[in-house]
Every structure is written in structure tokens, then in C-alpha cells.
Amino acid sequence: MAFIFCAPALSDRIIDRIFSGAVSRNKSLLTESRMSYPDFVWFLLAEEDKRHPRSIEYWFRCMDLDGDGVISLYEMEYFYTEQMRRMEEARIEEYQGLQDCVCTMLDMVKPPSRIESRWAI
């Protein structure tokens, strides 16, 4: 699927999720691989202001593959592996492995239990 907006910034897996209906309000246009105007505006707002609660919800829903309201380590790995591949193709060598990245995120978030392997908002 060709999606030109922010082409280098958005991975194929995220683009697939955007058009999968996970964040769409108008499911009828998705069969045509098109986005409705309100969905496009919602996408633009989410892309431009990533700190806004609606934006956080938008990207969370993109990453929540099974729609259970929780991002598991499997879901993180699904998106992270593609980013790693893209970074290798761009010859960017300064990146963390998933395990180090998750540890850094856990240190920042400070969840009540480190045993949990899922995050929810």
C-alpha cells in the first residue's frame, strides 16, 4: 500500500495498522484502502502532537494488535523488529536491542510490578 505522508518515519507495519480499521471511525472506506477526511485529520493531529491524550490513544490503538487494551511484549517486538531492520538498512549502528529498550521504558514508567509483561493506558 502506497502511503506517502511521512514515508520514512512510518513503518509498513504501522501503515498497515492505520488502514486496518484499528483507529478508523469509518470502516466502509477501508475496503478501498482509503481514509475518510475525519480519519485523516485525526491521523494528522496524532502525528503532529504526540503528547496530547488523543494522540497517545491513537498510537496506542495502532500498537495494540489484539485490541485488548494492553500492549504486550509480543506487540512491542512485532513493531521493534521492523524498526531494527530499517535502522540496519540505513546503516544506523547506535541502537538498543529490544530487551534494553524495554528495561529503559520500565525505568521511566516505574510500574508497580516488573513481572507484568503488558502495558495499558
Image (tube, rainbow, N blue to C red):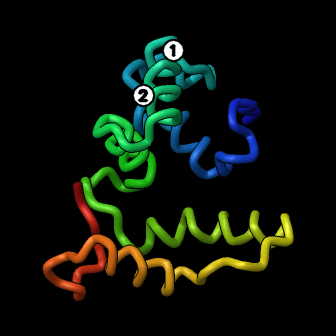
- Say whether disc 2 or disc 1 marks the residue closer to the N-terminus: 2
**Among the 4 quarters of the image, the one containing residue 91:** bottom right
Q: How many marks?
A: 2
Percent across and percent down for residue 113 are 17, 83
**Picture residue at 66% right of the left edge, 64% below the top:** 83
The residue shown at (52%, 44%) is 17
Can you give x and y, in whole percent of width and height, for residue 76 in the image? 46, 68
Question: Which quadrant of the figure has residue 81?
Answer: bottom right
26 to 53, vertically: above or below: above
Q: In 3D space, how far apart are the residues under numbered discs 2 and 1 (Cα atoms)?
A: 8 Å
Tell me what residue is drawn at x 51 percent, y 14 percent: 36
Give the percent coordinates (x, y) of residue 9. 68, 47
Q: Is residue 112 left or right of residue 3?
A: left
Labels 2 and 1 touching (C-beta < 8 A): yes
Quarter occupied by the C terminus = bottom left
Q: Which residue is mark 1?
A: 36
Residue at 51% from the left image edge and 11% from the top image edge: 37
Foreground of the two, 111 or 65: 111
Q: Quadrant of residue 51?
A: top left
- Disc 1 crowd rating (10 Å Cα; few below 14, some 14-19, many 20+) is some
The answer to whether 91 appears left or right of 109 in the picture is right
Going by the numbered disc 1, the residue's amino acid type is: Ser
76, above or below 113, in the image: above
- Quadrant (top left, top right, bottom left, bottom right) of the N terminus: top right
- Give the residue pinned by disc 2: 24
Amino acid type of disc 2?
Ser
Q: Secondary structure at mark 1?
A: loop
Asked which secondary structure carries label 2, the reply is: loop
